[in-house]
Image (cartoon, helix red, strand yellow):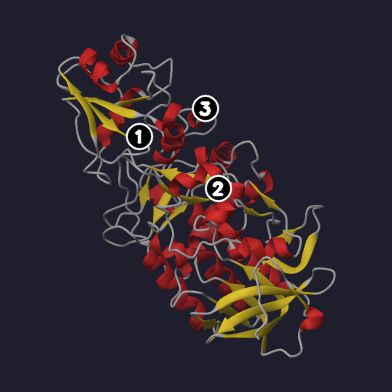
């Protein structure tokens, strides 16, 4: 009977009777972090083998919008008239990282965004260099530069000068992540990286001190033992597809379990493998979620209210931040109020439920079941603020404010039962900036590295997430892990 292997339990080195293969560096997962780790390790002279559970490279990265969160004065920003520098990027990312921000990681990334952008181009990823204004989820054109976060919204405007930092690969239509992965895959394979597809890594192989020496991987239905002379890099994604882990670590994320933003293999196996040899985890309760409230831009001019008739967020914030606020309203109830002058339906939810329509706000209030006078008071106050061009309550920018006075009035339902959120997890293994996985005492685990959503990186606070942070963090810190493991002494 074949032995049972589990990501949650490392196979002890003493149990390995023979190695079925060996290389310098093993990379688990062929998404953006795995690709970038492999490229850097190979360019540093290490022999590299990637094992990918899917039948092709890409992972969740290939399903993304192909945006990288970059700034500091890239040539694209300069050519389109936007001033930015590393200090502004650092301040924005520091606030975006939330209460548990990793300042060392932020500082290193902010100082190197311009050079990292050049590196991405050097790998063959094309960027047109043009700017696309307005509120975008991702470009539907082949333009490059967009506002991909809350850079121009309160409270982020209090710490950093606004600048667009979403840099999207050049491709017409949505889903440029596929192009990003095609280019990185081509580069990795051209360098001589060996790739195995439809292969599932079952467990790490570690000695009695938990130092990692290799992996157990299922190939053609059979478990094989592969030795990594320098180290193993875990780039196997997050755990949004693992119901048990969500219930244990991130129960609030169960709301997006049925509708994850993933390729389907974010089962937490990489994180569990790291934990099996003593790897510490952090921010496991944090996740990104969205119910896109734009485009079109007109929707940003509406106001969100809860079942008490109260506003709770500045509507010009990034759609993921707005969604996190929506999800924690009483009973999950939230509606976007609009008047006839601005009424439109969200592009990503054109069949959105219209919860109420009325010729007066009093009618709308009654239809929504809100206590008499509460919604009317909120709208009256907001209209005064809009007339004055200042929002002292939620600090919405005047650019997105206009009085809601033209009947009929409508409420679009963003309630949990009408508009399900989609998303992914942000927590993961604790690592150094060079990718070494740390244990609970802060010591590096020999031979083990992690990057991408398997590690807890720059994006670690759902309320501070911006589009492009995942690809930016995964590519940059995948590179750092690749560089570090290639320099490790062979064991």
Mark 2 lies on a secondary structure that is loop
Note whether 297 is above or below 189 in the view shown: above
| x and y percentages locating residue 61 in the rendered image | 45, 62
| x and y percentages locating residue 121 in the rendered image | 45, 65
Mark 3 lies on a secondary structure that is helix
Is 225 or 243 nearer to us in this picture? Answer: 243
Q: What is the CA distance from the residue labelled 2 to the residue labelled 1? A: 26 Å
Say which quadrant the N terminus sits in.
bottom right
Residue at image coords 22%, 38%: 345
Residue under label 2: 459
Q: Which mark is residue 227?
A: none
Is 230 or 160 nearer to us in this picture? Answer: 230
| x and y percentages locating residue 397 in the rendered image | 37, 25
The local crowd at label 1, few if under 14, some if 14 to 19, many if 20 or more residues have their Cα within 10 Å, is: many
Foreground disc of the pair 3, 2: 2
Foreground disc of the pair 1, 3: 1
Q: Which mark is residue 158?
A: 3
Q: What is the CA distance from the residue labelled 1 to the residue labelled 3? A: 31 Å
Say which quadrant the C terminus sits in.
bottom right
Q: Please give left or right for residue 350 compared with residue 245 in the image.
A: left
Please say if the residues under marks 1 and 3 sit with CB atoms less than 8 Å apart: no
Residue under label 1: 415
The local crowd at label 2, few if under 14, some if 14 to 19, many if 20 or more residues have their Cα within 10 Å, is: many
């Amino acid at each position: 009977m074949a032995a049972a292997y589990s990501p949650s339990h490392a196979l002890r080195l003493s149990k390995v009777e023979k190695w079925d293969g060996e290389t310098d560096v093993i990379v688990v997962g062929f998404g953006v972090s795995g690709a970038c780790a492999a490229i850097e390790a190979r360019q540093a002279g290490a022999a590299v083998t990637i094992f990918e559970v899917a039948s092709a490279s890409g992972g969740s990265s290939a399903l993304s919008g192909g945006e990288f969160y970059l700034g500091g004065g890239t040539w694209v920003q300069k050519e389109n008239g936007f001033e930015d520098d590393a200090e502004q990027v650092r301040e924005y990312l520091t606030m975006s990282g939330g209460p548990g921000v990793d300042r060392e990681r932020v500082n290193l990334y902010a100082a190197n965004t311009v050079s990292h952008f050049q590196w991405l181009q050097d790998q063959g990823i094309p960027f047109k260099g043009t700017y696309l204004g307005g509120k975008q989820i991702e470009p539907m054109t082949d333009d490059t530069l967009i506002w991909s976060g809350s850079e121009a919204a309160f409270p982020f405007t209090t710490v950093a000068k606004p600048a667009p930092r979403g840099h999207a690969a050049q491709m017409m239509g949505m889903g440029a992540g596929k192009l990003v992965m095609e280019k990185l895959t081509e580069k990795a394979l051209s360098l001589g990286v060996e790739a195995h597809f439809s292969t599932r890594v079952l467990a790490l192989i570690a000695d009695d001190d938990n130092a990692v020496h290799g992996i157990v991987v299922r190939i053609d239905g059979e478990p094989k033992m592969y030795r990594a002379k320098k180290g193993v890099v875990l780039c196997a994604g997050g755990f949004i597809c693992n119901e048990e882990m969500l219930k244990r670590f991130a129960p609030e994320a169960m709301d997006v379990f049925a509708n994850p933003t993933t390729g389907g293999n974010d089962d937490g196996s990489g994180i569990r493998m790291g934990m099996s040899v003593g790897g510490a985890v952090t921010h496991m309760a944090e996740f990104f979620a969205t119910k896109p409230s734009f485009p079109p831009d007109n929707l940003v001019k509406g106001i969100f209210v809860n079942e008490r008739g109260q506003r709770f967020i500045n509507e010009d914030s990034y759609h993921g931040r707005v969604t996190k606020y929506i999800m924690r309203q009483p009973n999950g109830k939230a509606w976007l109020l609009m008047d006839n002058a601005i009424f439109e339906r969200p592009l990503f939810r054109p069949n959105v439920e219209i919860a109420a329509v009325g010729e007066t706000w009093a009618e709308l209030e009654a239809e929504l079941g809100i206590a008499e006078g509460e919604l009317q008071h909120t709208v009256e106050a907001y209209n005064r603020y809009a007339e004055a061009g200042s929002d002292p309550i939620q600090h919405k920018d005047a650019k997105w404010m206009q009085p809601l006075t033209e009947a009929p009035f409508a409420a679009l339902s963003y309630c949990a039962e009408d508009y399900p959120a989609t998303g992914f997890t942000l927590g993961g293994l604790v690592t150094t900036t060079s990718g070494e996985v740390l244990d609970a005492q802060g010591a590096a685990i020999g031979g083990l590295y992690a990057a991408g959503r398997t590690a807890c990186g720059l994006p670690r606070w759902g309320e501070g997430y911006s589009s492009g942070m995942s690809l930016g963090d995964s590519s940059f810190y995948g590179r750092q892990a690749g560089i570090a493991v290639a320099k490790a002494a062979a064991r």
